[in-house]
Image (cartoon, coloured by chain):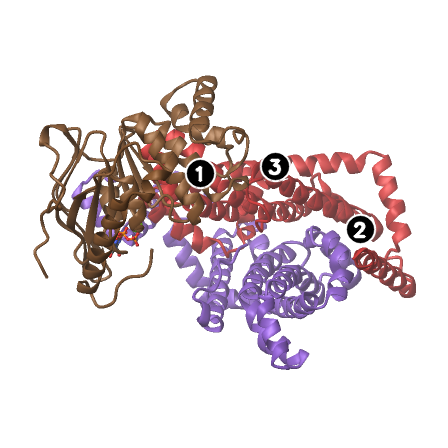
Amino acid sequence: MNDGRRAEPGAGGAPVEPGSNLIRLRDVSKTFQRDDHVVHALDALDLCVGRGEFVTVLGPSGCGKTTLLHLVGGFELPTAGTVSVDGCEVMGPGRDRGMVFQEATLFPWRTTRSNVAWPMEVEGVGRREARRRADRLLARVGLRGFENAYPSELSGGMRQRAALARTLAMEPSVLLMDEPFGALDAQTREAMQEELMRLWQASGLTVMFVTHDISEAVFLGDRVVVMGVSPGRIVEDRRIDLPRPRTAQTRTDPRVLEYRAHLWELLARHRAASDPEPERVP
Amino acid sequence: MTSRIDRGTMRKVAGVLIALAAWQSFAMSSGSRLIPGIEDIAIEFAGLALNGELADHTLTSLSQGLLGLFIAFSIASVSGYAAARNWAVDAAIHPLVSLAYPVPKLALYPLVILLLGLGWESRTAQVALECFFPLFVHAHAGAKAVAPRMEWLARNVDASPWQAARDVIVPTAMPYMLTGLRIAIPIMLIVTTVTEFIGDSQGLGYLIARSASYFDTASAFAVIVVLGALGLLGDRLVVLARDRLVFWEKGASL
Amino acid sequence: MSDGRAPLATLREAPWIVSIAFAASLLAIWQLGAAMGRLPEYILGPADIVAATFDQIHRGELLDRVIPSLRRALSGFAIGASIGVVLGLLAGVSRPFRELFDLTQAFTHPIPKIALFPAVAIVLGFTDPARILIIAIAAFFPAYLNALNGALGVNPGLVWVGRNIGASRVRIFLQVVLPASLPRTVVGLRISLMVSFIMMVATELVGHSDGLGAGLMDAYLEAEYGEMYAGILAVAVCGVLANAILLLVSRRLLSWQGAGGTGHD
Ligand SMILES: Nc1ncnc2c1ncn2[C@@H]1O[C@H](COP(=O)(O)OP(=O)(O)OP(=O)(O)O)[C@@H](O)[C@H]1O
Ligand SMILES: [Mg+2]
């Protein structure tokens, strides 16, 4: 097995200069105790994400993508190494890092508006002001007219949009997204990707976006970080030189195909090189 | 389809009629005053209702029972919540509660009388004692049922423990607590009735015991009908509350 | 909670230490309070209770109480629960049958069955049959309702498979519906058993009787507090044991599906 400990910049990728890095992971390892053996979810991983950058994380199931996001989010702490955001070591979750989970975790007992208003209510924003801002956010994610609907009345894509709006309501500087569109059908998924691009373009947010889907990774990312399995590590960090803003047109760019083919091959190689029984459980 | 529904309704009504007819013929064929016919029960019911006794005793029973239920609900909610959220509290009280759950707490009634006397205090306390256990178990399970994602969400938005409890945990636990309440209401009626049998007192249980001491089974059954109606009413109220409070859980079994 | 103090972290790995320590300290405080003699005379300490219980066992009085009580509780439970399970399963598979019982059940279920006891006792006297009848009626309902819901909840696909391979109705009932509704039925049986014990004590507290409940009441009236506590302890042990045995049996019966239900619903 090759020594893929360091983030090797891909052919076209140069790491961003350290000064503008918002997220820094240095020598980060994470192990889990399962029954009687230790699972190395992440091993001596280094990664930097620049301010305002959109980084997609790609890799086979079980390579530690979710774990990586949880570490940046502060939901879990590294076994070794440090995770810092904006120069401060991450010791726990915080409102500067908003997480969008794979399954939209909306409160079934609150309306869409009230779900989105919740982070602001928690902060102490007045009820009326929180609702007003919630409506604005809902309009931004294309949910105008669904303010009073309950999550059970929304489609999967709409729920995911509402969850995104709620995360934006925290006014985070980092957006952590864990396969947020994984459960959507192909069309909805593409529409959501384009909307996300639109939103991000206007926001200046730093995004870490985990996905299984190569096309999604290429379409969205400034960089695609490819992870390999057992132990979880970065096997390639590739800059994606596609013009911004990215729209539906971007999908027809010939370079998209090139990136896809390259990443596809890379993933196939690493999947084959990894343990004999690949985990299929999401 | 409609004829099917109609047949169903007819069968249901027929079932009640058959049950009533069976009772009536049993009463008539026995020829004993001790097995009252339906008309005897109705007459006694009207008598008790008209002279105001029924309302008085119902009020007494209900106020004692509901107070006991309320006390049990409050203690069970707080302790169930605390145990679900804190491992040390859980380790301290959960085994004791599990151990005592299948024990009929009614066995403690003599002790409760010694402590609180034969009045309403001991009856209320006994109701609370017996109702506490199912309520605790359900409050505990409810507070435990919060999805880890929801907890993380609360941490992500920096919600205080109080905010997390109010906005995340209590709504999640609500359906469980209502189920607990639905189990506790019949228990409340049982304990209220038994404790009112004992000692000279007031309440529906007392009314039954008094009627029985005069060999007046018709009156006793009239009171039993009231108790059944109270149980049914309480149960429907909880279901109604469930539909309003936990509206997002469609068709959840209670 | 995660304040990182090492002893606390170790304790957290073995919470049973906290359980035992808490129970032990409760007992110790109780014992201390009793030993200091500041408590009313009817509050005995744990040591006195154990001593009184052994004394009662020694004189054979406790067993004389336990046996008639258990006989009533268990025969009432056996009669009521078995009828309940059979009718519940039948109602689960037969719609006309279910509809016939539906309203009657809805109106009779909420009646606290103990309320029937004085009236029944007028006819049958304060006798064993009267008590067993009340216990059986009380035990019937949870068994009936849970068996019914168990049978209603059987995956129709399983029944179709049975039909498809041409199994007879009886065979489908015995080999598909019965096992598939077993988890829920067993939950009903556990509730029935608990109800039976409550009714056992309740029917014995009232009227002239032997048995544990009556023993408690007599001891209370005669201010024989040691006897009273021995009775309480005996009731508790009976309740816990009966529940544990049923739990064990249900684990056996349901070994294919993991746990034996929660015992409440
Ligand atoms: N709480 C945990 N306890 C034990 N092992 C864990 C835990 N969380 C993750 N793991 C293990 O760590 C490894 C990485 O898990 P992770 O969820 O990060 O993978 P992933 O890349 O997100 O996979 P997927 O694409 O399927 O979501 C896996 O082998 C997983 O089994
Ligand atoms: Mg994952």
Q: Nearer the viewer, mark 3 or mark 1?
A: 1
Residue visible at 33% across and 59% down in the picture: A281
Give the residue pinned by disc 3. Answer: B244
Hue used for the chain lettered B = red
Q: Amino acid at mark 2?
A: Phe
Q: Are marks 1 and 2 on the same chain?
A: no
Secondary structure beneath disc 2? helix
Which residue is nearer to you in this view: C14 or B17?
Answer: B17
Where does the image place residue C170, in percent across and percent down from the top left? 66, 79
Callout 1: chain = A
Task: Classify the position of the N terminus of chain B by image quarter.
Answer: bottom right
> In this rendering, is residue A233 above or below C129?
above
Please tell me how crowded label 1 is: few (under 14), some (14-19), or many (20+) other residues with Cα within 10 Å.
Answer: many
> In this rendering, is residue A203 above or below B120?
above
Residue B3 falls left or right of residue A137? right
**Which label's residue is closer to the chain start, 3 or 2?**
2
Cα distance in 3D space between marks 3 and 2: 34 Å
Give the residue pinned by disc 1. Answer: A106
Return the mark for residue B221.
Answer: 2
Residue visible at 44% across and 32% down in the picture: B167
